[in-house]
Amino acid sequence: MAELKERLRADLTTSIKGRQQLRSSTLRMVLAAITNAEVAGKQARELSDDEVQAVIASEAKKRRESAEAFTGGGRHELAEKETAEAAILADYLPEQMSADEIAAVVAEVVAQTGTAGEGNRAMGTVMGAVQPRVKGRADGAAVAAEVRRQLGG
């Protein structure tokens, strides 16, 4: 069994015993999403730690997007709940890269591939080389925006 999934289960037990309702419900939700991912497809199987991490990242992103939507709709109490859930999930993800770190990685890839000044034509080439380096540590939209900026597109 994946260590990360085991850690989630142990933390769920601890939060239930400590009567931490928000943490318990958030961990239950992410464990359910992991189970759904395991049984999806033709054959049920255990997920690896990387796959579990991808599910957690997806759930955290959903929470951030929901918080933005609730804030835009004037539902601040719901936005706060979504933000709190995203913060709980962030504990199980690697530390996110700063904008400067993303810019440095993109600049390095642009220099290596020789795509400077080619605009959006080189977007796929650069993104394909950048994504493995930042996987799980940076939001794809932020990376794409930085690539566009550096390519002059």
Image (tube, grey):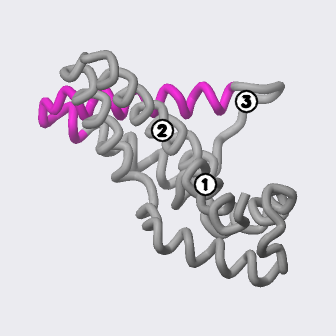
State the extent of the magenta-drawn residues as a range. Answer: 14-39
Residue 108: image x %, image y %?
A: 68, 81
Residue tagged by mark 2?
Answer: 61
Q: Earlier in the sequence, mark 2 or mark 1?
A: 2
Question: Which is nearer the eye, 150 or 67?
Answer: 150
Q: Viewer-proximal residue, 153 or 6? A: 153
Q: Position of residue 149 (x, y in %)?
A: 63, 62
Relative height, residue 153 to residue 25 (above, below): below
Task: Estimate the spatial distance between the alpha carbons at disc 1 and disc 3, rounded to whole Å.
Answer: 37 Å
Is 1 rendered above or below residue 86?
below
Residue at screen point 47% across, 73% down: 100
Q: Indicate which disc, 3 or 2, sits on the residue closer to the N terminus.
A: 3
The answer to whether the residue labelled 1 contacts the one labelled 3, judged by CB atoms less than 8 Å apart, is no
Question: How far across and how far down the image is residue 117, in percent?
Answer: 78, 71
Mark 1 residue type: Ala
In this view, the residue in front, 91 or 119, is 119
In the figure, residue 8 lies in which quadrant? top left
Q: Height in image: 23 above or below 75?
A: below
Q: Is residue 67 left or right of residue 47?
A: left
